[in-house]
Image: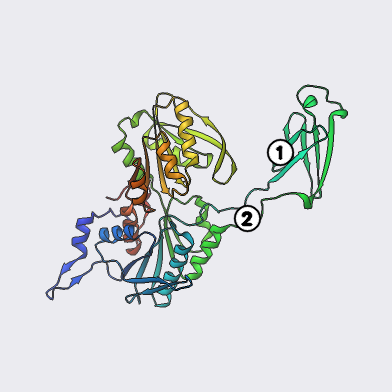
Amino acid sequence: MPVSQPVRAKSLLRANLENSRGGLLCSRMPNIKVFSGTSHPDLAQRIVDRLGIDIGKVVTKKFSNLETCVEIGESVRGEDVYIVQSGSGEVNDNLMELLIMINACKIASASRVTAVIPCFPYARQDKKDKLILKLCIKDCFNYAVILICHKNVKISPGRKLLLNRSKIFLSVISPQGGDGGDKSNSNKSHIVMKSNEWKFRSRAPISAKLVANMLSVAGADHIITMDLHASQIQGFFDIPVDNLFAEPAVLKWIKENIAEWRNSIIVSPDAGGAKRVTSIADRLNVEFALIHKERKKANEVASMVLVGDVKDRVAILVDDMADTCGTICHAAEKLLEAGATKVYAILTHGIFSGPAISRINNACFEAVVVTNTIPQDEHMKDCPKIQCIDVSMMFAEAVRRTHNGESVSYLFSNVPY
C-alpha cells in the first residue's frame, strides 16, 4: 500500500471546508475534535490552523484551594479527540489538567482520546539511580578519601574498596605509601563499615512509568510525543505511542541557515546522545564528535572530555533538551578551546529554567536553536541568541494520519510541509 503524501495547509483548508447551499461549513475530517490545555495554546492553534478545523471549546479554572477544574464546552460523543498539552511551565499542574481533560472526554463517550504531549513530563526520571556508595573518611595519617563506587573497584594506587552483602572493608594507604613510598603495612589503616552505614541512592522512583500509568488510567487510548529523553519510555505504556523526531526539521534548518554546514561537525554533549548525532551526521555526510561528561549531582557537571577533532570546523551541538544549560555552555567552551570556528546548539526541548538564559547570553554560541514543543516567546525576548523551529506541521500531519488510519512513518524522515 503506497504511503500517502502530506497535504499542504492551504489545500487542506480548502478540502476541509466547503460552503453548502445553506452557507454551513462541512468538514471532510468528520468526527474529530482538538482541544488545548493551558500549557501551550499557541502550538494547539497552529495545529488546528494547519488542519483547517476549529479548536475545541474547553473551560479550565482553579478553585480557591488550587484544585483544577475542567469543563468540555461541546459534545464529544463518538468523536476522535486530541488533547494538546506540553510538559512545560507548571509541570505538575499541567499534567493534572491533562489527566482531567482526558477523563472528562472519556466519560463523555469519546470514541478515542489521544494525548498530544510535545514535551513528555518526567522523562528524565526513566530509571532508578545506580547503586552508589559515598564515603568521606580520614585515616590515621589525616588523609581524606572520597569514594563513589558501584562494585568492587580499585580507586587509585594504594586504595582498594571491597564490598559484600554485610560490610565494607576499606584499605587506605598513606600518601607516602600511595605515591611511590614504602607500601608496608605500617602505612595502612583499615576501616570496616556495616551495611546499615552505607549511603545509597538506589531508592529513587521511576516517575516516567508512573506518568504512563496515570495517562492510561485517566483514559488515554494513544500518545503522540516528540523526542522522548529515553526511547524505552514507550515500553512503559500498554497503549500505542508515536514518538516523533525533530531530526527532519533540524536537518532542514541546518541546510538553510548555516552556510558552512558542509564543513561542520555534529557534536553530542553526552554519551547518551551518540545515536542521535550519528544519524544527523550520516544524513549530512559530515563527521561527528562526542563529549563525555561526569556529573557531581543533578544540573551540575564536574568534568568534560572531547572525543573527536573539531579544529577549523563549525561545531553543531545537538541534544534532546536543555534545562539549566550548564552542560551545553561548558561544551561550547570546550569546543572553542579545541579549535572550532563557530558553535551552534540545536535542542528539541528548550526548558531554560534557573540561570539558563543568563548562561546562554554570556556563552559563545552563534545561535541556540530550539523547537516550539515548549513556549519560547519569553525566552526569545530575553535572549536574542535563541531561535525557534516550528514543528506544528509535524504534529498536525501526525494527527491527520492517525485520524485517517494512515501510517506516520513518513514523518520520521521528512518534514511534511
Image disc number at residue 35:
none
Q: Quadrant of residue 29?
A: bottom left
Q: Does residue 221 appear left or right of residue 193 in this picture?
A: left
Q: Which residue is mark 1?
A: 146
Mark with earlier residue (1, 2):
1
The residue closer to the viewer here, 5 or 395, is 395
Number of marks in the rendered image = 2
Question: Tag 1's secondary structure?
Answer: strand
Tell me where residue 359 appears, x and y as whole percent. Answer: 44, 40
Q: Are marks 1 and 2 in contact (CB under 8 Å)?
A: no
The residue closer to the viewer here, 162 or 89, is 89
Name the residue rendered at 55%, 54% in the picture: 125
On screen, residue 160 above or below 409: above
Q: Does residue 310 appear left or right of residue 33 in this picture?
A: right
Tell me where residue 264 appears, x and y as whole percent. Answer: 38, 30
Give the distance between the C-alpha atoms of the residues marked 1 and 2, in whole angstroms.
22 Å
Rate crowding at label 1 as few (under 14), some (14 to 19) or many (20 or more) other CA atoms within 10 Å. few
Question: Tag 2's secondary structure?
Answer: loop
Name the residue rendered at 32%, 63% in the picture: 404
Is any atom of residue 413 visible in this view? Answer: no
Q: Which residue is mark 2?
A: 204
Tell me where residue 303 appears, x and y as whole percent. Answer: 57, 34
Q: Does residue 336 appear left or right of residue 390 in this picture?
A: right
The residue closer to the viewer here, 163 or 15, is 163
Picture quarter with the N terminus: bottom left
Q: Does residue 190 appear left or right of residue 10 in this picture?
A: right
| Identity, as a three-letter code, of the amino acid under mark 2 | Ala
